[in-house]
Amino acid sequence: MSVEKIRGKRLALVTIGQAPRVDITPDMMRGFEEDYDITEFGALDGMTKEEVAALAPADGEDRLVSRLVDGEEVICSHAAIEARLGELFARIDADKFDAILMLCSGKLTEASHTLPVFSPYETLNAEIAECRARGEVIGMISPLAEQIDKNKALFDNPSGARFSYVTPYGDGSFEAVGEELKDTDVIIMNCMGFDSEMAAKVEKSATVPTLTVRQIFMKHIERALSKDAAA
């Protein structure tokens, strides 16, 4: 993740699904005292549902979950999304923006640009390191069962963590997932689609402090969007 301050107010927000992300962006930006010029981009923008369906992962292939503009959940091949992101980043004009904020907590190697790029993946890793340094047992929630192995790879010793899954884009039971993770010290909901209401349901059920990766990301972005940096 870039450690630079954001020296202007023109922000490009990039989702791996379709923009605008009405479920994320207003929540992210409402807490800031300054007004920012926001433009949203999506890796799947302009695609029909049939075209998106063609990006579905094969058996055993890494996958990413996101949201279409109509709110529908979509599951795509990680490699296909990376290819789409590479094309998208090439179209983001460095003269028109001051920074790029990613709206995905997965590890995205194609998310590189001459502009500063701020990634939830990096802030998530920093938070995990801080929790583990305190000796805390972390509960990690992903949208898909198939993503649990990838979440385990975030830990040097995954046996010291607990894992479960529930989609933020459907009718899953957050209370049931909270019950599964009662024997942890802190729970992290690892997808930008998880919001504070979902976290509250998990926390009430688990009686364990629960954070969304969105909250963790914005804690770091707020530092970068300081008044001095935005002036």
Image (tube, rainbow, N blue to C red):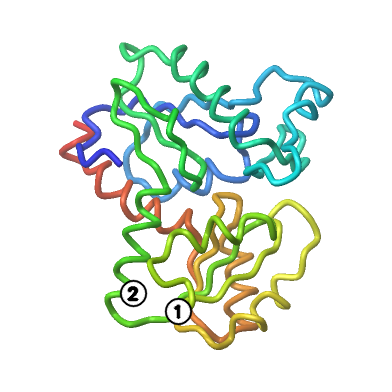
Position of residue 96 measured from the top left corner of the image (x, y, whole percent): 35, 14
Residue situated in front as seen by the camera: 103 or 144: 144
For disc 1, the marked residue is 160
Distance Cα–Cα, label 1 vs label 2:
9 Å
Of badges 1 and 2, nearer the viewer stands: 1
Do callouts 1 and 2 mark residues in contact (Cβ within 8 Å)?
Answer: yes
Q: Residue furthest front?
A: 60
Task: Please report whichever mark, 1 or 2, sits nearer to the chain's N-terminal start.
Answer: 2
**Residue at (56, 86) in percent of width and height:** 207
Q: Residue furthest left?
A: 228
Secondary element at tag 1: helix
Quadrant in the picture for the C terminus: top left
For disc 2, the marked residue is 132
Identity, as a three-letter code, of the amino acid under mark 2: Arg
User: Is residue 185 found left or right of 126 in the rendered image?
Assistant: right
Q: Residues within 10 Å of mark 2 (few under 14, many from 20)?
A: some
Quarter of the image holding residue 157? bottom left
**Residue at (54, 29) in percent of width and height:** 82
